[in-house]
Amino acid sequence: MPHCPACTAPGLEVSSDGTLTCSYCGTIIPGDSNVCPACGHVNVAGVETCSSCGEPLSLVAQVMIRQESRDQPYRLKQVRTQATALKERESRESDKRMEVLQAIDQRRHAAEAEAKKAQEAYQRKVSSIVLLIIPIFIVFLILLVVLTR
């Protein structure tokens, strides 16, 4: 029994004008076209494979694949076999992005440490200047008081 390309439910009904109608979702499929069971793309009559995804469209090919893959569309089977490779590639790319972000974070930490050192050096210079100026100012005030008496 053919399955609906839209909802994959079994039970397409043939109407008097040759169109197929899904009893579950109501999808109408023209009678003179091949609908891809994997992606739902409507192909012209007589083609062997879907022009969109490569799914075999002939009845013999569909039966062979369905028996082989337990109602799993050809394209879905292909995608599932590629899923592991895709996950591994995405994991590697994610690791690369993480390494770049960690390198940026390390440079930021190094720059912050350098800025902190520079700030501490500046504060030491200011403190030493203040410590030199205060005694001079005190001596100046004492001289001013002594001279004004």
Image: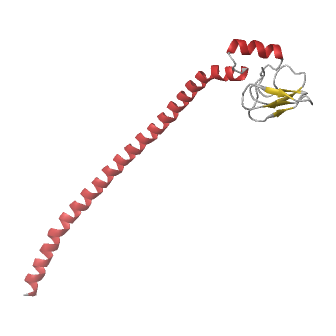
| Residue toward you, 88 or 81 | 81
Q: Is residue 74 left or right of residue 81?
A: right
Q: Residue at x 41, y 45 (%)?
A: 108
Q: Residue furthest bottom?
A: 149
Q: Is residue 127 above or below residue 107?
A: below
Q: Residue at x 61, y 24 (%)?
A: 83
Measured as percent of width and height from the top left, residue 30 is found at 88, 31
Q: Residue at x 77, y 20 (%)?
A: 1
| Residue toward you, 39 or 16 | 16
Measured as percent of width and height from the top left, residue 42 is found at 83, 30
Render colour scheme = secondary structure
| Residue toward you, 107 or 59 | 59
Quadrant assignment, res 45: top right
Q: Residue furthest right?
A: 17
Measured as percent of width and height from the top left, residue 62 is found at 78, 17
| Quarter of the image where the C terminus is located | bottom left
